[in-house]
Amino acid sequence: MKRREFIKKATLTTAGAFVAPYILPSGRLFAPSGSQIAPHVVLVMYAGGIRNQETVDQLYLSQSQHTWNPIPALNVTGNIMPNMLTGAAPASKIVYGTGISGNTPIPPILSTSLQSQGVLFKEVNAVAPGHYGGSIGLLQGNTNLAQPLLDRPQTPTIFEFLRKHGGYKATDTWFLGNSLGNSVPLYNHSDDPDYGAKFGANMFIPGVTFGSQGDQFLKNAKVYHPQNELSPMYKMKYFLDNSYESLTQNNVLDVVGNTEAEKAKIKAFMKSMFLKKQAGAVLQPPVSGGDGTTIGYACEVMQEFNPALTVVKIDGPDTCHSNFTGYLRAIHQADHAVGFLWDYIQNQIPAMAGNTIIIATPDQGRNLNPNPILDTENNFRAFDHSDANTRRVFTLMAGKSITNHPDKATGPISSSSPLNTDAAITIGHILGIESEMLTSGYLHGNSQSLIRKL
Amino acid sequence: MKLKQIAILSTVFFFTFSSCKKDTIDDKVFQVENVNLYSSASSKLKEKTESQWIAVVYTNLFQQALSASDIYRAGQCITSIGDKELAREVIISNFMNNTSPSPQIPSDIDMRSDIDKFVKDTYERFLIRRPTEGEKQYFRNEITNDPTRSAEIIYFSFALSNEYLFY
């Protein structure tokens, strides 16, 4: 009997010794089934609603203003995104730059555009028009027409897929948002009971976290000794939590599951950001402000944490509801900021240089026809977003293993066009969890990794 | 027979109107009416909003109220950070570093001079209830067995606890 017990225990111990090293931080037993194409992905949600006419079609004013006001001076085409797209800049009527009347375009940062380095999917179907639906669609790989504003996404985001199925830790996934509006602070995880906060991403809305609110309530945080003070504090907190959770069901809280070590690293990062801000040394593109500031903080996060997935949401171009001139400038400055980000990764973050894939795609397009509002600077017509043209967007991809290809999906939008929500499965494919995502039942029925379309 | 009925009625009356009387503590900040203590943590089922948590933690630490605009701004800080627990931790650390006003925390000498009172007062202040025997014993051991355990760190753990997020 004793011998039998000994053999049983010895067998279990041996099996445990083999299995234990493969238990991932998420509690998952095995590593993801797919292999990584690259260890890092940056998704730029080039959001705010951008028409293909002013971006990939490079039509500048000719089909936005000249159509409605056919004077020769407005019949100008050209590329206003020199870091992302290949093409000559407009030759006249320059209003999208900086300086007096915006007549000075910002010099490109990248010597070769991302389009020339990688691949442009030119006509992509924005399956979920609307800022919130469109943006979280990029993260969910699907659309949910019943999704209310100011509610968490109802199905899992790419962050949760990665952390649950890929075993990525919390600081491997980051979301950087540009404001507290439009439900942006809800993007980092869904409410899905099988996924949710515990698989969510870390997030900053830098304009608030490191803005005047952060100066008042976060900047002066006391630094406690990790062993003598913080460790006992956490120990007593856990005692209180266990005591409470034994009495109630209230144990599912909105925490993304950073370990104590990860929390310490994030707190140190926040301290350093406040110091850098005080010294005027926070990274930012040469022409900054607005979306550029968010991109600058994204570079800081990538420098510190080398995340597997960094998602940056920008939306300056949405000023197009009433200010077309401002829209053109926002597109141009966002292109400048993306150029800065890519250049910074390649030259200043050794762990990510040559190892990263960038994907840039809008949440939605904008209307074909203008609304009645004229901007004050140039009397340009403004555009909202609700008609079929709103479905026309692009997806640009470059980086590790993405060799240059002629433009893809160049024909009109059809049922076989790529979806902008394919961004999610493409990220999953790059980071090794494609099959887990495809079999989850949560993705759009036509979802396919864009890399498989090359 | 009558005497027996009177005795039963008296017993029912006694338990009805005396045993259910709620324990209360003084409201030291607003001093309007006493605060009813929870009989147990199990009756706290509603989660505080970010603004409610900010308002309550500030009041508990400083024994004075935070302005409505500051409650809103501090709430925005929590909203802007993905890990809400980490956000709350940084906000508490920020409050602990305040000098004007300073958080109202008993000195370690006061805490150690009457540990049972400190534990009871801390539970009442943060969790609006009395500690169980097991909880009293746990914190008694924590304070007694470790001379470096400070009232500030204990307050911190209460303010960051999950129970403190519910009412």
Image (cartoon, rainbow, N blue to C red):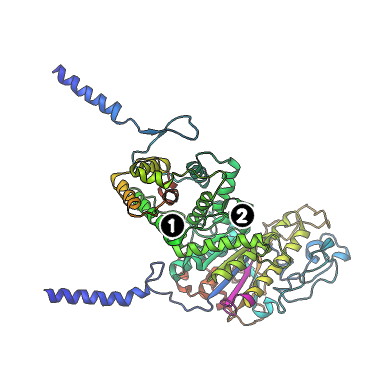
Pick whichever, B142 or B43, lies toward us: B142
Q: Which residues are magenta?
A: A347-364
Report x, y in % for residue A387: 68, 58
Task: Identify the residue position indicated by label 1 in the image.
Answer: A229
Numbered circle sitting on residue A156: none
The reply to whether residue B147 is in sight is yes
Task: Identify the residue position indicated by label 2 in the image.
Answer: A208
Specify whether residue A179 is painted magenta: no
Q: Is residue A155 above or below residue A348?
A: above
Q: Quadrant of residue A385?
A: bottom right
Question: Residue at 45% of width from left, 29% of height from top?
Answer: B33
Specify whether residue A363 is painted magenta: yes
Q: The disc numbered 1 marks a residue on which chain? A: A
Q: Which is closer to the viewer, label 1 or label 2? A: 1
Whichever of callouts 1 and 2 sits on the residue coming sooner in the sequence is 2
Report x, y in % for residue A241: 38, 52
* Residue A123 falls left or right of residue A438: right
Question: Residue at 33% of width from left, 51% of height from top?
Answer: B144
Report x, y in % for residue B55: 52, 42
Q: Quadrant of residue A415?
A: bottom right
